[in-house]
């Protein structure tokens, strides 16, 4: 059957679809002749009998690989139209344009066979429902898939072979460029680019943290280079941007900066997402699974040993891992043995806790296997950490003493180098800003002055570069003035003297807890803690395992329990008696006037009296507003009921005219209000009763003698509280007749 014989009226009544596809965008841009040939298939469809308006072109898949249907919206549209029976013929340059895998190809053939749809390529017209045509189309599909596999294998083999020699030109990170020779990699010719990269690696060697390096760059107002275009070609166009954590992390972890050529650091994986679409992701591989690693391939910023040490430090800056001492980043807490201390019983890593009034006293505990005994969890140990930290720090300083002088001199040199590196980078930024300003000026001078549309834009760009230059110069001048001066010979001698007294450097306020813990980790791998409770105090055995395998045993004596602190029983009994009559503030005043103190030697306050009452179960004072007759009243309440001034009542109390009660020396006086006491205070004096002066004259004695007789009951007296002659009235007995 000829090609035209396969075309029937049923096919012509339906539309014709021309399917276009190129495997990549580069092919679309460069292989334009192939794209034009595919568009010319429209004329072939017209020649086969379809009118031009009934011919549809699907070119949505230009630049998309045919290895699968993922992301091929044009192929999905074609399959839908074929399945609905709307297509009479599908035209493609060759069948590989439709699909490069048999799963998609045979699905299209099945749909075309069921809906009586023809498939045409440059070789002819085929009907998938016919056995011979289907067999031929299946063979073409199989060859297309095999061709893709063979091409990919050839290309990958060539790529790997070239990469094994270190000559495959892959994108290099900023700071490295490809040279003219095969496989030659050089440093970037821009001194500012290499300077900031060298400063980053030097700073990481000092602080050991990617985040600290990033914060240091932001603090010093340093920018990072970025090469957006010409990444592989080695373009000199470099942009300077604000540093980000991701950029700093990439610089510190990329092996190219260590002079190594690496290929195959990632692996491509296919997976199906939640929507059922096949996706591709790249997974980073560990170092031992890299396909190609060529050390010392080119000049780097650090050597390979330093790179491996940096990766180990970065990998350790994570959350602590269970049962692995020494893991996890150093934190800000004052517990020096964080991530180093392990339990001597079970080997588990000890957990840090803090206690005390300000939650600043460290301690360590081991939960053990989390067993339950009598309804409670048991712990292998729970111990304070101050003594343990001190013992380990002393052992560390003792071991470090021989290298102390060298360490101090190195620290002083690093301090100066850090300031110099920052200033050098800012000088390079000023040079870069000066070059940009000069370049903008030359561009402005070269433009035609009459072309104001261009001149205004160049003038604005020139002004912008001049502003940036002025800001960079001002920043450099400020930093040069703020730079610490160089150390004198006397100061260097003082630094050398610190080597003989490491304790002074260790305890200095400028040495943070994080610094101390970082120093401990440089020499110590593990500290095994075993608590021995053989007496009242017990002791703790420490086994320090140093880097290299050396062991040191230490014994830290336990802290004896302090004696119990108790308030004396006499004070407690006195508070119990006083609480019946007085509030806590009054009781505190009485105790202080008697010279009593708390169990800790402090004066009494209302709060401390209240605490004592709660501890001993003493009820507080409850005043009763309705005082019954004969009850004890304070001086103020008694004076109010008697209608006199409190000072007068105090005076008569001292003179003995009125009787009072006092629970303890220093306690307030109280008056028992009775009818007998009320009768002593009257408004009018009885007849014959004399005032105090008249009574002293009648009796021929002093005032004090009269009052003593009243107090002893030998004379009767009342107090007149009204009138002009207020005061005491004394009943003087009549005189007896004399014998002569």
Image (spheres, rainbow, N blue to C red):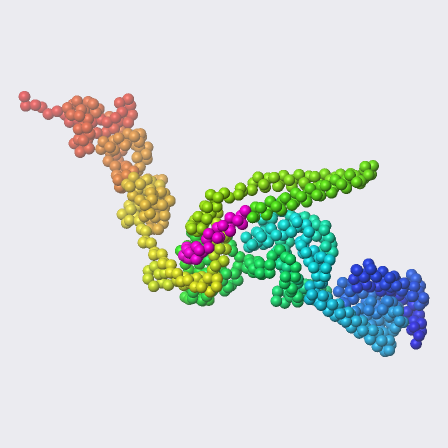
Give how far across and how far down residue 365 sits, in percent: 44, 60
Give the position of the N terminus as an image quadrant.
bottom right
Give how far across and how far down residue 207 sits, in percent: 55, 53
State the image quarter where residue 15 is shown. Answer: bottom right
Classify 79 as above or below 593: below
Residue 722 belongs to the span the image colors magenta:
no
Q: Residue at x 71, y 63 (%)?
A: 167
Relative to the observer, which residue lies in front, 7 or 586?
7
Give the position of the C terminus as an image quadrant.
top left
- Predominant SS of the magenta segment: helix
Classify 233 as above or below 276: above
Q: Residue at x 42, y 51 (%)?
A: 500
Give how far across and how far down residue 688 sits, in percent: 19, 24
State the image quarter where residue 90 is shown. Answer: bottom right
Residue 248 as seen in the image, left or right of residue 85: left
Residue 440 as seen in the image, left or right of residue 429: right
Q: Tell me where the magenta segment starts and ends, as one range.
A: 388-416
Q: Residue at x 56, y 42 (%)?
A: 483
Give how far across and how far down residue 419 sits, in percent: 57, 46
Q: Note whether residue 708 is visible.
A: yes
Classify 422 as above or below 54: above
Residue found at the far bottom of this picture: 131
């Amino acid at each position: 059957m000829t090609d035209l014989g396969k075309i029937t009226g049923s096919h012509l009544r339906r539309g014709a679809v021309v399917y276009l596809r190129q495997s990549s965008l580069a092919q679309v841009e460069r292989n334009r002749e192939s794209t034009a040939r595919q568009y010319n298939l429209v004329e072939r469809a017209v020649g086969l009998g379809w009118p031009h308006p009934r011919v549809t072109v699907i070119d949505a898949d230009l630049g998309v690989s045919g290895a699968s249907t993922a992301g091929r919206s044009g192929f999905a549209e074609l399959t839908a139209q074929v399945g609905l029976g709307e297509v009479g013929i599908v035209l493609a340059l060759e069948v590989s344009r439709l699909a490069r895998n048999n799963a998609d190809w045979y699905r299209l053939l099945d749909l075309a066979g069921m809906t009586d749809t023809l498939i045409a390529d440059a070789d002819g017209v085929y009907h998938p429902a016919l056995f011979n045509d289907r067999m031929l189309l299946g063979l073409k599909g199989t060859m297309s898939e095999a061709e893709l596999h063979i091409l990919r294998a050839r290309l990958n083999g060539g790529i790997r072979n070239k990469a094994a020699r270190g000559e495959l030109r892959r994108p290099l990170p900023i700071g490295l460029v490809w040279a003219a020779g095969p496989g030659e990699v050089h440093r970037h010719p821009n001194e500012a680019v290499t300077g900031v990269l060298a400063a980053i690696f030097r700073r990481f060697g000092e602080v050991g943290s990617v985040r600290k390096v990033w914060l240091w760059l932001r603090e010093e107002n340093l920018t990072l280079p970025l090469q957006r275009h010409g990444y592989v070609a080695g373009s000199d166009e470099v942009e300077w941007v604000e540093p980000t954590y991701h950029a700093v992390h990439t610089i510190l972890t990329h092996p190219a900066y260590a002079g190594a050529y690496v290929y195959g650091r990632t692996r491509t994986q296919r997976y199906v997402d939640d929507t059922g679409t096949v996706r591709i992701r790249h997974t980073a591989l560990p170092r031992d699974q890299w396909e190609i690693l060529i050390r010392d391939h080119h000049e780097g910023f650090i050597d390979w040993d330093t790179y491996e040490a940096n990766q180990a430090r970065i990998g350790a800056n994570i959350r602590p891992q269970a049962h692995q001492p020494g893991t996890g980043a150093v934190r800000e807490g004052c517990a020096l043995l964080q991530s180093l201390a392990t339990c001597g019983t079970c080997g588990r890593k000890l957990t840090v806790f803090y206690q005390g009034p300000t939650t600043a006293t460290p301690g360590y505990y081991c939960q053990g296997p989390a067993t339950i005994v009598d309804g409670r969890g048991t712990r292998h140990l729970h111990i304070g950490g101050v003594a343990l930290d001190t013992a380990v720090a002393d052992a560390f300083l003792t071991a470090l003493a021989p290298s102390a002088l060298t360490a101090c001199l190195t620290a002083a040199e690093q301090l100066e180098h850090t300031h110099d590196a920052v200033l050098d980078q800012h000088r390079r930024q000023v040079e870069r800003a000066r070059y940009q300003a000069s370049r903008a000026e030359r561009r402005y001078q070269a433009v035609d002055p009459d072309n104001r549309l261009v001149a205004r834009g160049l003038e604005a760009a020139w002004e912008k570069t001049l502003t940036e230059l002025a800001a960079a110069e001002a920043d450099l001048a400020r930093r040069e003035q703020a730079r610490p001066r160089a150390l004198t010979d006397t100061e260097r001698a003082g630094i050398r003297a610190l080597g003989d007294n490491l304790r002074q450097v260790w305890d200095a306020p400028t040495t943070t807890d994080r610094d101390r813990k970082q120093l401990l980790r440089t020499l110590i791998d593990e500290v095994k803690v075993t608590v021995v409770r053989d007496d009242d105090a017990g002791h703790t055995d420490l086994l320090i395992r140093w880097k290299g395998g050396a062991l040191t045993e230490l014994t830290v004596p336990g802290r004896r329990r302090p004696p119990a602190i108790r308030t004396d029983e006499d004070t407690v009994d006195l508070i119990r008696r006083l609480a019946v009559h007085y509030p806590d503030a009054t009781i505190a005043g009485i105790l202080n006037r008697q010279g009593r103190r708390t169990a800790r030697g402090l004066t009494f306050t209302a709060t401390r009296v209240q605490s004592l009452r709660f501890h001993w179960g003493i009820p507080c004072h409850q005043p009763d507003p309705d005082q019954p007759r004969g009850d004890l009243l304070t001086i103020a309440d008694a004076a109010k009921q008697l209608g006199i001034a409190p000072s007068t009542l105090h005076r008569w109390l001292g003179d003995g005219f009125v009787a009072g009660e006092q629970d303890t020396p220093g306690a307030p006086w109280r008056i028992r209000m009775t009818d007998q006491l009320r009768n002593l205070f009257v408004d009018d004096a009885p007849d014959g009763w004399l005032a105090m002066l008249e009574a002293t004259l009648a009796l021929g004695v002093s005032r004090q003698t009269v009052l003593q007789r009243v107090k002893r009951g030998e004379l009767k007296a009342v107090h007149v509280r009204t009138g002009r002659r207020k005061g005491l009235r004394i009943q003087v007995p009549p005189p007896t007749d004399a014998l002569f």
